[in-house]
Amino acid sequence: MTDVQLGMPELPAPDYPADVRARLEADAREVIARYPDSRSALLPLLHLVQSEEGHVTRTGMRFCAEVLGLTTAEVTAVATFYTMYRRKPSGDYQVGVCTNTLCAVMGGDAIFEELKQHLGVGNKETTEDGKVTLEHIECNAACDFAPVVMVNWEFFDNQTPESAKRLVDDLRAGRPVTPTRGAPLCTFRETARILAGFPDTRPGAVEAGGGAGPASLIGLKLAKGEALPPRVVHPRGETAEEPPRDRAPHDRPIAGSGHLSSHDAPQQTSASDPKHPAGPVSEEGE
Ligand code: FES
């Protein structure tokens, strides 16, 4: 039972060592200067203190409150609201399995269950070696590559239970892993510092740019007038024609599917069934 539960005032959070405090204050001044109102810097400053200790401690929240002129209650309310802030020590690699609706039905639930068994941990728990924290996450707007796994917020698209197990094995063994798109992977603390607004100076990180993949860019291509093969709904039993082979490699359909991702294939619906055409029910038929 805590002091608060016993009705006793909670002990103040300890301060950082002087050298750490001086370094964080310099960083905080740089972040705060970007905003017209200092309290607007609270979210990046929470990432900053998270980069220091790997999670948001009471010391970190006290620091944020002091440099922003807020109460610790105000800082705590924000830090406990957003799931990107961790409240207890965890692993170098946060492995988030999307179990939101689309990823779940495409295999996300199965991936999450298999990783729990494989790693011997539950949701928000960390492996004994301190390398991997597993958690299920909500939709990360990458539904066209479902099921998606994110490691420290970098995308690993179109995962399977087997590929996800290989991924966590590589992370734990220190073998290099490469996200499907976007910047190279770094540790959770390094990610937190980038999220605090400090430039990612690693070679190749800037060039990697954003993270949109070909399936996500189809709408943009259409808007630019870059023609794509017409999308045809084929009657059951017939297969799509092979698409032209002069397309850029990243735009080619995945092997054997005839489609840009494994999930954009025409579905068998009543609209594709000539024996059961869709449409308004006629009055005679009622
Ligand atoms: S449902 Fe998983 S990324 Fe959207």
Image (tube, rainbow, N blue to C red):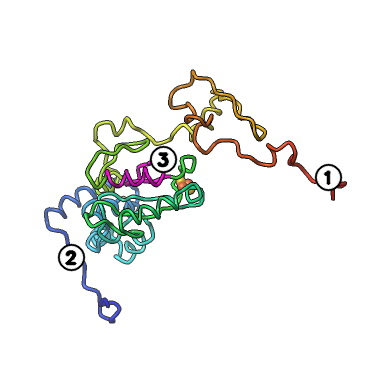
54 in magenta: no
Q: What element carries label 2?
A: loop
Residue of label 3: 157
Is 117 in front, or is 222? 117
Percent across and percent down for residue 262 are 50, 37
Quarter of the image where the N terminus is located: bottom left
Categorize mark 3 by other alpha carbons within 10 Å: few (<14), some (14-19), many (20+): some
Looking at the picture, how far across and down is residue 113, in whole percent?
A: 40, 55
Above or below: residue 131 compared with residue 228: below
| Residue 279 as seen in the image, left or right of residue 126 | right
- Labels 1 and 2: the sequence-earlier one: 2
Q: What residue type is labelled 2?
A: Pro
Task: Tell me how far mark 2 sits from mark 3, CA to CA.
Answer: 42 Å
Q: In this view, does 179 lie above or below 84?
A: above
- Can you say whether 54 is above or below 164 in the image? below
Task: Tell me where residue 195 appears, x and y as whole percent.
Answer: 31, 46
Identify the disc placed on residue 73.
none
- For disc 1, the marked residue is 282
Question: Which residue lies under the disc numbered 2?
Answer: 14
Question: Which residue: 24% across, 35% down?
Answer: 202
The segment highlighted magenta reads 148-170
Residue displayed at 28% across by 81% down: 6
Rendering quarter of residue 197 = top left
Q: Tell me whether the residue at label 1 lies in contact with that at label 2, contact meaning CB atoms closer than 8 angstroms.
A: no
Q: How many labels does the image show?
A: 3
SS of the residue at dot 3? loop
Q: Which is nearer the eye, 51 or 168?
A: 168
